[in-house]
Amino acid sequence: MSEALVGRHTVRFTLDGPRDAPVFAFVNGLTQYSSLWESYSQHLVGAGFRVLRFDMLGQGQSDKPALGVRFEDHWRTLEGILDHLGVEAAHVAGISYGGTVAVQFACERPERCASLTAMSCFAEMPPQLYLMGCGLFEALVEVGLPSLQRWLMPMNMSDEWLAANRDAMPEMMRRGYAINDLYALQNLMESVNDFEPITDRLPRITCPTLILNGEYDFFTPRKCHEVLRKGIRRSRLVIVQHAYHAYTLEHPAVTMRLIRSFLDHVRAGTWPGDQSVWIAADDPSAPEPWFPCTGDHMRAIPMPASTAPRGNPATPAPRRAPRARKAGHAS
Amino acid sequence: MHLEQYDRIRAAIAARGLTPEMETRIALFVGASKAVNLPFLWLAGMAPATSVAWQAINTQLFRESEALTLLLRVTRWTPDPMVYVLSSQLTAPLYAESLRLGWSDGAAQGEGIGLAALAFGHALLATVRLAPIIPAEEVPANPFAVALLRIEQENGRLLQTQIRLLKDGFAGMSLSDRESAIAEKAALVEATFSSFLDSLAA
């Protein structure tokens, strides 16, 4: 790994791809490390990008300040690496903790963000997310890292994945335990406590933006991504079918295809960015990567979309709604 | 990151089991990492119990003592004297640092001893982690393996105590100075722990 001095800390990163290609940067989730983007990097290098992967302060090979960093230090770290590389602007993608870092970078440095891919993340913390975060922090501090891992597994992955990987999970957890320093993880999680909502700054993001949300993600649910969709002018929200929080790991082929299609549009200057809602094709070789969402994307039951403002009692309900509810109840 | 060392040690334990020699070597190192910190906790515990910090330190004093007594009882100690000689060489830097903190720097630094001792405690609790060397099949029935895991679980709680005290206390000292003090201790403990892992993996 290469290294850059950002402030008084050393950050380690990997850069793959031709020197003159546009830079695409990945920002890790909380317990991730940069090597987990390896297959994504290969894919995007093949598509003509120069891919930057780095460990945030407190992660993997980068410095782990004993008393922690502030949440906003992470986007500054990304900026520091870009400065170190002499890169003016980059396509930026991040997931979960790193997704919010990526969104924050796009808010604070819109001129340096060529495109934004925001995955499983938030601009503000609704009470459920905040309390789950508190619970996870307590699990980490009071019970230990294996407890946090056991909570994160079912939040991140589907039943099918968990069943298929049941035998491999103890070793995955052991490696995660060995690679993640406990004090650094405690500090990273604690830094979220001081996170200030950035919803009012979302309109500053002017670049094409792809927002990805797992269909069943109950950790950062649809409403978190709805805030992003409404606040970012040139965005589209794409819902990844059958996915939970960590579809980059569970559905890499689908996710790679979505990012690649988005980038093709960005490079061609054809990204519609109309704040519409789409559903990702389950099959990564399907003719189109996504199709329009015609139902109400905010509901878990398949209600038709309402064109009226939500919660307006003067507006009559869509005519098909009662039938759909009844049918759902009967089954 | 010690993954490669952990893998080799776990493979050795999986092949030969947790022998009395292996248990003794581990117990002497983990025991040392507890023993070197106890005098500072004991001294701090003599202060008036007027703060929340005092409760945290009092808890730590007894948890660290508990870990030591647990190891003393569950370890199958080897009669081979060379194991003790080699272990004393491996743990010597920890004892030397403890003595240096207690007798050389303490009188001169006044309040600084608190920061240095907490930084040392942080480094010990953050660095000495052995759970990944235990093969999964050893856990349910092996008292030594269970004790190691219990101690490490407790270390996580105590680590948060160090973080809190170092973050929230010492307001007169800059964050970077505090981090430098911790980094100095972390480097010493890391080098000592890495040598220990190498010796176990050999």
Image (cartoon, coloured by chain):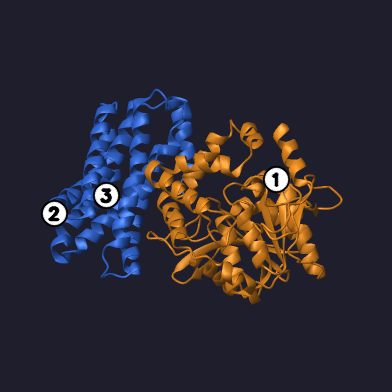
Chain colours: A orange, B blue
* Residue A283 coordinates in the image, percent (x, y): 80, 45
Q: Quadrant of residue B178?
A: bottom left
Front residue (pair B98, B150): B150
**Which mark identifies residue A167?**
none
Secondary structure of the residue carrying tag 3 is helix
User: Residue beneath label 3, please?
Assistant: B94
Q: Earlier in the sequence, mark 3 or mark 2?
A: 2
Q: Amino acid at mark 3?
A: Leu
* Residue ID at (17%, 53%): B44
Quadrant in which the N terminus of chain A is drawn: bottom right
The residue located at (35%, 63%) in the rendering is: B179
The answer to whether residue A149 shows anywhere in this view is: yes
Q: Residues within 10 Å of mark 1 (few under 14, many from 20)?
A: some
- How far apart marks 3 and 2 lie (CA) works out to 25 Å
From the top left corner, tell me how far across and down residue B130 is, in percent.
40, 40
Tell me: A304 left or right of A158.
right
Q: Quadrant of the C terminus of chain A?
A: top right
Q: Secondary structure at mark 2?
A: loop
Q: Amino acid at mark 2?
A: Ala
Q: What residue is pinned by disc 2?
A: B47
Quadrant of the image occupied by residue B181: bottom left
The residue at which mark 1 appears reads as A251
Q: CA distance from mark 3 to mark 1?
A: 47 Å
Chain letter for mark 3, please. Answer: B
Which chain contains the residue that carries disc 1? A
**Is label 1 in contact with label 2 (beta carbons under 8 Å)?**
no
A34 in relation to B18, above or below: below
Chain for numbered disc 2: B
At label 1, the amino acid type is His
Give the Cα distance between marks 1 and 2: 57 Å
